[in-house]
Amino acid sequence: MADLDTIERVKEIEVDKYKYGFETDIESDLAPKGLSEDVIRFISAKKGEPEWMLEWRLDAYRRWLTMEEPSWAKVDYPKVDFDDLYYYAAPKGFDENGPNSLDEVDPELLRTYEKLGISLKEQEILAGVRRQDEPSKLDDQGLNIPKGAVAVDAVFDSVSVVTTFKKELAKAGVIFCPISEALRDHPDLVKKYLGTVVPVSDNFYATLNSAVFSDGSFVYIPPGVRCPMELSTYFRINEKNTGQFERTLIIADKGSYVSYLEGCTAPMRDENQLHAAVVELVLLEDAEIKYSTVQNWYPGNAEGKGGIYNFVTKRADCRGDNSKVSWTQVETGSAVTWKYPSCILRGDNSSGEFYSIAVSNGRQQIDSGTKMIHLGKNTSSRIISKGISAGKSSNTYRGIVSAHRKATGARNFTQCDSLLIGDKCSAHTVPYIEAKTPTAQFEHEATTSKISDEQLFYCKARGINEEEAVALIVNGFARDVIQQLPMEFMAETQRLIGISLEGSVG
Amino acid sequence: MLEIKNLHAKVASSVEEEGTEILRGISLTVNPGEVHAIMGPNGSGKSTLSYILSGKDGYEVTEGSVTYNGEDLLDKEADERAAAGIFLAFQYPVEIPGVATMQFLKTALNSQRKARGEDELSTPDLMRLVREKSQMLKVKPEMLKRPVNVGFSGGEKKRVEILQMAVLEPTLCILDETDSGLDIDALRVVAEGVNALRSPDRAMIIITHYQRLLDYIVPDKVHVLSKGKIVNSGGKELALELEKDGYAAYEVDAA
């Protein structure tokens, strides 16, 4: 009886619950459909790239042709027809130079970001329109940046529409720009680091990305600089049948610090859209990067039709001693997720953290986790994963913790908690642990629980309705991870978790 | 205020067979300002009655009616009943990991206010209200930061139940074996908290095994429940008789 109810309610999680599902009606420049060396030349020419970059892409493409799609993840989806995709889509008028100012950007595009609640208008932020409590003033570094303001790189399909606060950041020596621009303005830096964390041949999707990546963010923080504001990239897939292949490269030089946020949404479409990104983080001595993601790609409808395939390779390389990286992810969207933000702890005393909340509902499938590769001495890592499954979804944590034989004194603490809502969903935990040094100290804790009828009744008896009660209990369950998020994302995340689970209890 | 007429109920079951009837024709009227004690042996249906009044799933009312301030109560969801002023102090308060007690109180109070069409209370106003009420119940501010009922001692759990009651200001309080698991000092604190909430427009139903609690919270009326029926009703002296003679006499009578 209760089961039928649950099914009915879950069915109601229709597309209209996804509030970012609107489409922007805009004319686009598309590459010819399908993938070939010519299409890669087309993309490279569109971006006005140097010759070596084109060669790099073509090399990746030739390798990719020999590779096979991985099948080890616990996800099941119709094979992607890679010849039926557009690999480049840009709003008309975006040539290699892009718009010089916001005035040149199609107002329809700007409205899109307004609707998504993202301000691209620096002047407004600076004038305190958005934050009246924070009048703009010069801070101690002589920078005109209001406290709490966030610099945004807005990526629409295959191009970066605009990057805010570039000039102010440049005063601090920080480079924050689309990667296509970095290839023109800072080719040496890009050439030095691109593909050094995620090699061209790393895996099927990363290799594909290397061949066809279109845009993404480039960040360089010079030695000793603490980035004066949060940086963020906002990804939006709009065009039909396109793949988004963004590439992000962040380099934190010696003793620097940056906090970076990433957000994603897409319109509701019946077809699946492919998102195969690569994110590379490089950390030199004493550097620290905090990377946070709130992923809310369209998850498809209740029958599992449509939605984004999110096949992403994210990796951080702690090259320098005492460097520190922290991944925090909130995964609520996408039809299929295949994603393992990882840390290579190469420098002595370096540390990596992975905090994850993965919420699946309807027919979503998530296979996500992390890899902590301990190579240096006295390296430490920490994994806190909170999986929440509802509806008929499948939610898998998959992770590796390994210590090289020279990684003496390596330490890891892993905690994987799963929460089940209803009885049609599943949760799986697949941890691999490998220690080649007897001095390694690895701990693994895992729990699986359900929202109990007693908890729901207790909340309801206090006047809290069922949906609010589920949101409250789930947010409590995920609290350890939510607390790791930057302030800007905390409230949004709590709300998003509630929305994602609407109708999950009968 | 509360009107229970010939209430019959059993455990809901999807199987098409006669479930055992737990309540077998209860009638009870509770007026504003009154404190009623319901006493009875294990399995007499005391807790079931409290669950049915507060709207817990899993029970089926087969006959009879319950109205609250003239409205049919059995039609409402548990959260709607709470907003209408009904509060159940749980015998076994439930843990909600990761949710701070203060946050829980805020969500509960504002949900009820919203349902009644009232403005939500701001965080500072709420903090003031909660702090004031918690002093009386000897609940320390640090405790309000801890997750709901997680790692609380038996006494702490019951004190926080009564604190919730004080903050939510219900019109009908149902206390389900609030005395269980309390030592004599904790019992006194809890009873004082409850007594402070007695008022001419608030009614209480106190469910208990023992006379002990009723030494501190003196009822206007005492009812004896046995095998799903009220078999005797009287004043506070009835509780003393029960303490002396036990329930044996009633169990024979009711069989």
Image: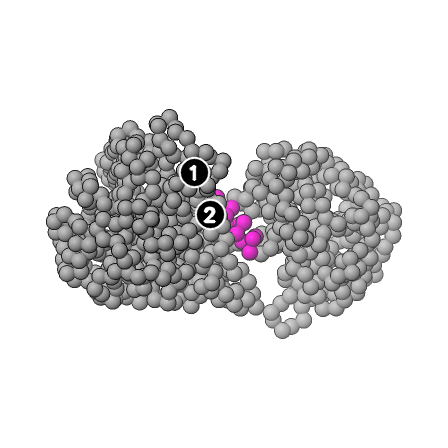
Task: Specify how the rendered protein is coloured.
Answer: one colour
Q: Amino acid at mark 1?
A: Ala
Q: Residue at x 47, y 56 (%)?
A: A500
Near mark 2 (Cα within 10 A), the count class, few <14, some 14-19 or many ≥20, is few
* Picture disc at residue A286: none
Q: Is B196 positioned to the left or the right of A151 in the image? A: right
Q: Is A157 positioned to the left or the right of B78 in the image? A: left
- Tell which of B245 and A438 is nearer to you: A438
Whichever of labels 1 and 2 marks the residue nearer the N terminus, that label is 1
Per the image, the residue denoted by label 2 is A492
Residue B113 higher or lower than B16, as above or below: above
Image quadrant holding the C terminus of chain B, namely: bottom right
User: How far across and how far down the image is residue A453, in percent?
Assistant: 58, 56
- Tell which of B107 and B43 is nearer to you: B107
Span shown in magenta = A467-481
User: How far across and how far down the image is residue A325, in percent?
Assistant: 32, 38
* Residues at discs 1 and 2 both on one chain: yes
Q: Residue at x 46, y 47 (%)?
A: A492
Among the 4 quarters of the image, the one containing residue A112: bottom left
Near mark 1 (Cα within 10 A), the count class, few <14, some 14-19 or many ≥20, is some
* Picture disc at residue A127: 1
Chain that bears disc 1: A
Among the 4 quarters of the image, the one containing residue A374: top left
Can you see residue A239?
yes
Q: Residue at x 87, y 47 (%)?
A: B237
Among the 4 quarters of the image, the one containing residue A245: bottom left
User: How far across and how far down the image is residue A264, in percent?
Assistant: 37, 52
Question: Residue farthest to the bottom?
Answer: B16
Q: Amino acid at mark 2?
A: Glu
